[in-house]
Image (cartoon, rainbow, N blue to C red):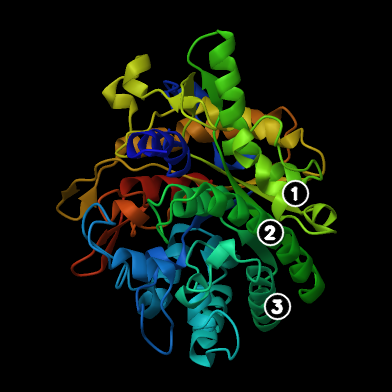
Amino acid sequence: MDRKEWLKIAGLVGAGLLAGQGKALNWSAEQEMLGSDFGEDFLWGAATAAYQIEGAWNQDGKGPSVWDTFSHKKGKIKTGENGDDACDFYHRYPEDIALMQQMGLRNFRCSIAWSRVLPEGKGTPNEKGIDFYERMVDKALELGVKPWMTLYHWDLPQALEDKGGWVNRDILGHFAEYTDLMTRRLGDRVKDWMVLNEPLAFTSLGYLLGIHAPGRRSIRAFVRACHHAAMCQSEGGRIIRANVPNAHVGTTISASPIHPKEDKPKHIEAAKRVDALINRIFIDPACGLGYPTEDLPLIRSIHKHMEPGDAEKLAFEYDFIGLQYYTRQVVKSSLIPFIRANVVKPVKFGVAKEDLTDMGWEVYPEGIYTLLKRFAAMPTVKKIIVTENGVAFPDKLEGEHIHDTRRIQFLKDYLAQVLKAKQEGVNVAGYFVWSFMDNFEWAEGYMPRFGLVHVDYKTQQRRIKDSGNWFSEFIKK
């Protein structure tokens, strides 16, 4: 496959997995929502990820992760930046969690940096690293903020990648060891766990397209990594449930509505293939349906990498599924091998510039309603929590204020669609904004700002944006 074809596939998969979004609903005073409309038990929170906020990349015994290695390579990050310091959450977590409390955010989605607690990915634990997470959890609970812990949010220890990473079947044992360690150390206090963050994203962007860490480009590596990640996803759930009394176990899936460019058979078939890739490759086996190989030729070789008993072990009945939604995809048929589909850029089907985000994604709030209805209809899905939804728009600092009115409208429009699904009987139990604060946005660097809280990366000063104040008041009502 030549470079041009790889770039086309990168546009197809990457556009669906990086983030994005919807059309304004023209709110009137009579239509104004209240947080209480979602019910007293609805969970409100904000999300983060270890590598994107912690910094302290080589302090207190932490080993390098694939993102430490990748971001230090020239040309891998658009802005030439890295996550060495990020938001310095490692040192500033008491103030940041206090800010969450001030904003009324009672649920905090965070993750563990695997190489901070197991520098080699296995073997002797780093007690200083574990101590950091214990102190962070204790501070959150002290302030009435519940930690929702994600075990894996993309930062694989480099030592494991050197041995093949997610392509090496040994990852099953290493992930089980890591999961066992952290659930035993934190399970007396942390009850809400997510196994993986967007497994399709780190397998496709990291092993198929090479635009995220570890930067590999191989269809065979991608297929093997998918199977091993799916196995770890279910096995991680079993370990959490065994180790944590009263555990509340989930995993997160990135998803997008997939629409054909035109109502023609070739475009409809292309949309079906893309849907299998973007939306089904991990949720189907978790629900006991197996891999969608009939609709996705790209992964038909996955059965070659399965051992006896694997098919049964793929399924796991989670307490909740975390839905992560940013934008829809409009696709057309193409001659690209394996996929034979291509993403149509939003401007090509009439999306105005004001309906595009800083990432170039279409604002499309109706999509979250569609996905909630769809996921709710899947077998074994008991409950859905929106574990990521948010937007990057240009933020202008005016004095001490950021008047991000477009982000406020975005939140209103998307939450209206979540409420619509809930009122129609979908068991959607919570909503986490991406993200609590501006952070290192992977290969995009620090330029896109998704946060409710503005971060001055030079001084590390935090300022609550107008959207943060709006969301705070909304969920307190």
Q: State the residue at coordinates (76%, 32%).
A: 377
The answer to whether residue 87 is above or below residue 251 is below
For disc 2, the marked residue is: 233
Q: Quadrant of residue 416?
A: top right
Residue at mark 1: 286
Return the x and y of residue 434 as percentages of the image width and height: 45, 50
| Amino acid type, mark 3 | Asp
Is residue 40 in view? no
Given contact means CB atoms under 8 Å apart, are the residues at marks 1 and 2 in contact?
yes
Please give left or right for residue 275 compared with residue 32 in the image: right
Give the CA distance from mark 1 to mark 2: 8 Å
Mark 2 packing: few (<14 Cα in 10 Å), some, or many (20+)? many
Determine which quarter of the picture holds residue 65. Answer: bottom left
Query: How far across and down, in percent of the image, does residue 11 sit?
Result: 39, 35
Which amino acid type is marked by label 1? Answer: Ala
Q: Secondary structure at mark 2?
A: helix
Quadrant of residue 102 in the image? bottom left
Q: Secondary structure at mark 3?
A: helix
Please give left or right for residue 20 compared with residue 292 in the image: left
| Distance from Cα at disc 1 to Cα at disc 3 | 20 Å
Local SS, label 1: helix
Residue 192 x/y as whole percent: 67, 64
Which amino acid type is shown beneath numbered disc 2? Gln
Mark number for residue 180? Answer: 3
Residue 37 or residue 155, whichever sits in front: 155
Tally of marks:
3
